[in-house]
Image (cartoon, rainbow, N blue to C red):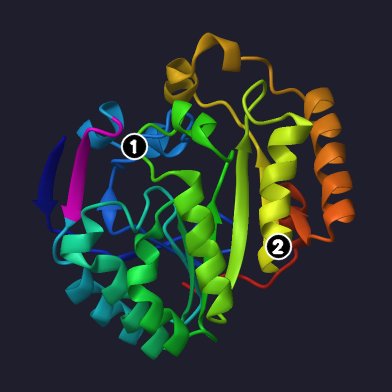
Amino acid sequence: MKIYEIRVRRALTPSGLPEYHYALNPYVGCLHGCLYCYAQDYTRGPPGAAWGQILYVKANLLEVLRREAAQLKPGVVGLSTVTDPYQPPEAKYRLARGSIEILAEAGFHISVQTKSPLVLRDLDLLRRYRESVDVGITITAMGDKALELEPAAPHPTARARAAARLAEEGVKVWIYLGPVVPGYNDSRQDIAEVVKLAASIGAELIYDRYRPKPRAHARLPPAYRQEAGRQWWTQVKKTIEELCREAGARCLDVEEEWRARRDLPQKPG
């Protein structure tokens, strides 16, 4: 594992995801090294090529962000879209924490997505700005099975505990079941365990299908390189929705959310 500090000229960038106006990625690369992660196909240079082994830290990020937050029109910021804001180096650099504070004070809404219980370190901040923050915890499968494709990510049990604690403290929490990979986490039992967690803590469950990208797909074990076709997804989606109804969980398909947002006003620039 190698970690390098870099300097950047921009902190916030326009988001390609319809649910966010801006993307904020404090790090380049991700040491969790999840095999299926699409971000490795969109990350340039060594951090993308050696996914999970090399990380760039944006050392001057907070300085740049303070300036941009004072100049740009407030909107929804995705923290983060191609990295995990709470991967291990965050314990030292505190870029996610600093970013939340700067953005919330400037009137932005921050949507955090992570696989790490390190987010609980910032519980004081998340409580203080609970009207301006939501936190998504990604759980593709419960138990040790998840570690097969998420080799360096925190254990799902630790993530589940973090999600429950955030919910108890009044922070808006959602569980991200994604990607659903053919042959890996698409069985009724695997899905039911994650749905049950979301229902038990009163969190919305947002789910999404696997979309193969060349670099990520090549890293998957052969058993999981099955065709993620429309027929397969129609059946899996039906199963997810049935389980959500049975458990009383609020569930949302990412693709449906994207379609619903197509007619939203232009994003701030």
Residue at position x 72%, y 39% in the image: 191
State the image coordinates of residue 248 (x, y, percent, origin top left): 84, 61
Residue 240: where, in percent of width, then height? 80, 43
Q: Which residues are magenta?
A: 51-57
Residue in the image at 85% along x and 30% along y: 235
Question: According to the image, label 2 marks what residue?
Answer: 200
* Residue 30 on image: x %, y %: 31, 43
The crowd level at tag 2 (other Cα within 10 Å; few <14, some 14-19, many 20+) is few
Q: Is residue 232 above or below residue 114?
A: above
* Label at residue 241: none
- The answer to whether residue 24 is magenta is no
Residue 223 visible? The answer is yes
Q: Which residue lies under the disc numbered 1? A: 152
Disc 1 secondary structure class: loop
Measure the alpha-carbon separation of dots 2 and 1.
27 Å
Please state which amino acid type lies under the numbered disc 2: Ser
251 vs 194, nearest the viewer: 194
Q: Up-down: is 202 above or below 66?
A: above
Residue type marked 1: Ala
For residue 70, above or below residue 224: below
- Eye-nearest disc, 2 or 1: 2
**Dividing the image into 4 quarters, which one contains the N terminus?**
top left
Q: Position of residue 36 (x, y in %)?
A: 49, 30
Q: Nearer the viewer, residue 147 or 75?
A: 147
- Residue 18 seen: no
156 relative to 203 in the view: left or right: left
Which structural element holds mark 2? helix
Q: Residue at x 67, y 23 (%)?
A: 182
Is residue 98 or residue 169 the one in the foreground? 169
* Residue 95, quarter of the rendered image: bottom left
52 in magenta? yes
Left or right: 11 as drawn, with respect to 213: left
